[in-house]
Image (tube, rainbow, N blue to C red):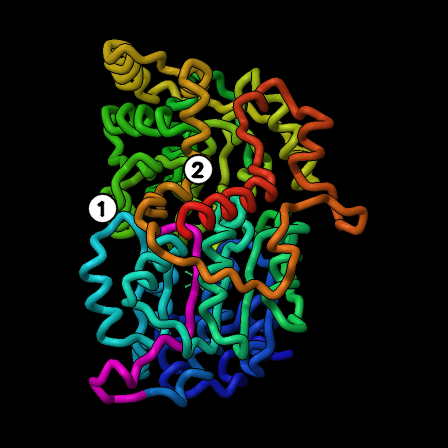
Amino acid sequence: MTSSFSNLSLAEPLARAVAEMGYESMTPIQAQAIPVVLTGQDVMGAAQTGTGKTAAFSLPLLQRLLKHESSSTSPARHPVRALVLLPTRELADQVAQQIALYAKYTKLRSTVVFGGMDMKPQTIELKKGVEVLVATPGRLLDHIEAKNAVLNQVEYVVLDEADRMLDIGFLPDLQRILSYLPKQRTTLLFSATFSPEIKRLAGSYLQNPITIEVARPNETASTVEQRFYSANDDDKRRAIHQVLKTRGLKQAFIFVNSKLGCARLARSLEREGLKTAALHGDKSQDERLKALEAFKKGEVDLLVCTDVAARGLDIKDVPAVFNFDVPFNAEDYVHRIGRTGRAGASGLAVTLVSGSDARLVADIEKLIKKKIELEAIEYDEDQPRGRINDGRRAWREAGETGDGRDAIASGPRREREREHRPGRETREPREQHRGFRPAVASRDPFFEKPYESSAAADAAPAWESARSAPRSSVSANIKPKRKVAALFKAATAVVATTD
Ligand code: AMP
């Protein structure tokens, strides 16, 4: 199998766009997926974020849609041919931007619809006609209900970050959307993990899929240098300043575990002279997009973010990622540090570990299967302690603890739970679907009844093992994933109220 784009026989407009992007060779997921998608087969793909997954599905999909290119201005000549579904607005926006770049020399049209934005401009775009529609499930259903989006000519559907969509509770929405699509189509499913639920979803909606697995989700990219520094909570901001200085870093992502902690840390770092923006679920859509744009343009040095807000975001050349808080879930560590070292670039991941984090670090060590060495930071004498202390004073004056972890402990548990309920951010209130008759027409009766674990299931679901073996005292703060049965009950409730 070749890894050069030039041997792919991509149509000239697509090859030109790829060359313009500066891609020289295909990434492993591209080398495996593109030839398969070009043949029109269904694909079930597991790939780390930042592996070039978007081009892996969108380039062959665009190539196959070229036969529908039309210069006509008539909307009827531009029906939706490909649908790409993603769990969050940021991801939808990002994927849509990439697709627009790949399609720029073709006559194929693409657009994106997601919640939290006025429906009108989206409606205008949809009414003009688009071949490729990128969407989050809730907003897409709103447009279907309003008859702005007609999906009966869809030939390709991509379920991207499918595991995340199920986590969020989008299964009933996905089922409805899929019921509107022609049965004769190509379905591509990408997921970080192939959990039993994902396999069932694939079993119901994919036909003889080719499985492509380029990297286990618990693998961290070899291009990322991972460092773990011992720093008590009072020293963590000073540690950030020190590492930025020593490494000559201009930009970084800083991860924290709560929205409250995120806003506080961003404010404190800003006071200490760093250009900082915060990205978390309580920010408006507009603020979130602006923060991202500012970071991309280099107008902001540090983007302080929570896991949900930053999941899957692709920002080129993020040279470093800091874990100001050690994540509660080891899987989040892998996702966080996946923000750096993307597509072969080198990156640095710094985790600041305080005395109470031992269990969480042990979990990470187990997941990444690498021995973690805890190092001490050597602080420069000229490191501006005074400036930082000033910041701390201001922080205390604002009535805060000055401690990210304290902020979590003292904050209501709801704070963390809300951060893990991003579906509500992307979906419109249920009331909006009133009067909408869901067409429940899944092909597998499994999706009509509550989930019952079967001995045949490949692995014990996460919540089962979590219940039998509590991971650490901290895990009391972690909201367990909702059982799939709960999702089905929710679906039933919707059917009952809307019928
Ligand atoms: P994705 O995993 O799709 O979010 O892509 C991660 C990043 O890799 C994006 O910024 C892409 O522009 C970039 N990328 C995708 N394919 C290639 C490639 N073949 N060579 C270099 N960069 C790539």
Q: Quadrant of residue 190?
A: bottom right
Q: Secondary structure at mark 2?
A: loop
Q: Residue drawn at (75%, 49%), measured in percent from left and top?
A: 457
- 99 to 12, vertically: above or below: above
Q: Nearer the viewer, residue 25 or 212?
A: 212
Q: Quadrant of residue 271?
A: top left
Q: How many marks?
A: 2
Principal secondary structure, stretch drawn in magenta: loop
User: The residue under label 1 is which amino acid type?
Assistant: Asp
Q: CA distance from mark 1 to mark 2?
A: 19 Å
For disc 2, the marked residue is: 421
Q: Residue drawn at (50%, 39%), measured in percent from left and top?
A: 349
Horizontal side of 144 relative to 197 (left or right) equals left
Q: Which residues are magenta?
A: 70-89
Q: Residues within 10 Å of mark 1 (few under 14, many from 20)?
A: few
Give coordinates of residue 90: x percent, y percent: 35, 51
Horizontal side of 287 relative to 281 (left or right) equals left
- 324 to 86, vertically: above or below: above
* Magenta stretch contains residue 73: yes
Quadrant containing the N terminus is bottom right
Q: Nearer the viewer, residue 435 or 9?
A: 435
* Magenta stretch contains residue 83: yes
User: Is residue 386 visible in the rendered structure shown here?
Assistant: no
- 435 to 181, vertically: above or below: above
Give coordinates of residue 231: x percent, y percent: 49, 20
Q: Residue drawn at (26%, 26%), measured in percent from left and top?
A: 267
Horizontal side of 364 relative to 460 (left or right) equals left
Give coordinates of residue 450: x percent, y percent: 63, 46
Give coordinates of residue 463: x percent, y percent: 65, 35
Q: Nearer the viewer, mark 1 or mark 2?
A: 2
For disc 1, the marked residue is: 286
